[in-house]
Image (cartoon, rainbow, N blue to C red):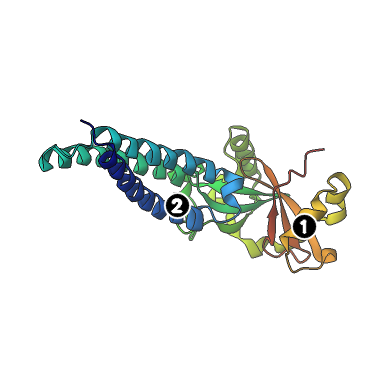
Amino acid sequence: MIVWREKFRALLLHFLITAAVSAVAAAVIFFVWFPDPFQAMMGGTKLFLLISACDLVLGPLVSLVIYNSKKSRRALITDYSIVGVLQIAALVYGVLSIAEARPVYIAFVGDRFEVVVAGDLADENLQAGKAPYRTRPKWGPKLIATQKPTDVEEQNALLFSALAGTDIQVLPRYYVPYEAAKEQIKQRAKPMEALYKHHPEARQLVEDAKTGVPESELRWLPIRGQSFWTVLLDANGGPPLAYLPLDPYES
């Protein structure tokens, strides 16, 4: 005779343990790797929900099937050890996949910002970079700028590299501190009216952003993650103040 109360008690306990482990992973992913608003911009939320949903649903359901109080302790330990190893392996694989997709640099590139994810940076390109740009940051994305070479031969090489899909934002040897591009950012940043002209809805988004900067002192530039968003800056070329879920190129 099947004792459903015992099975559902096992399911609930398994669910609570799985949820606790998932909560630890979520804390790392959402507070460190994908700080707001990069969860939405880079799809971190969808990735995590897909992974955790499988663990939270399939694992406890297995308990519902395999638990039987009439089994020996050794048999139960064996069953749950196998299930636990499979669940942990699936979670580790999922977290590693998310780690590869995490943003590591926010790079100013000419007339826009680019979100660089860990998987975009080849090891050989990292080794060719200057300190401190030879690693993939582990504690959230770092704000940087890029500087194009002045040598004509190197400029041509960079052009061909970009045509092949490896653009300047994924080549750390061209990384410089954000402050080094401050004047260029001031020149490239656009007035708010240029955004409002094509996107009147941006006014409410800017108001909701609560940047603490007068609107007359606000500027904007595009930022590309999985899609284009809009980044708000001050008129002096300072660091980003807010990110708006608005593609400025859409008409």
Position in image of residue 200 (x %, y %)? 85, 48
Q: Secondary structure at mark 2?
A: helix
* Residue 133 visible to an observer of this rendering: no
Residue at 58% of width from left, 51% of height from top?
A: 38
Q: In the image as oriented, which residue stretches furthest toward the front?
A: 1
Is the C-beta separation of discs 2 and 1 under 8 Å?
A: no
Q: Is residue 113 above or below residue 80?
A: below
Task: Answer few, some or many: residues within 10 Å of disc 1's Cα (few below 14, many 20 plus, some between 14 and 19).
Answer: some
User: Which amino acid is tagged 2?
Assistant: Ala
Q: Which residue is mark 2?
A: 26
Position in image of residue 159 (x %, y %)? 64, 38
Q: Nearer the viewer, residue 42 or 178?
A: 42
* 144 on left or right of 215: left
Residue at 41% of width from left, 37% of height from top?
A: 54
Residue 68 — which label? none
Q: Is residue 139 above or below residue 78?
A: below
Q: Which residue is mark 1?
A: 206
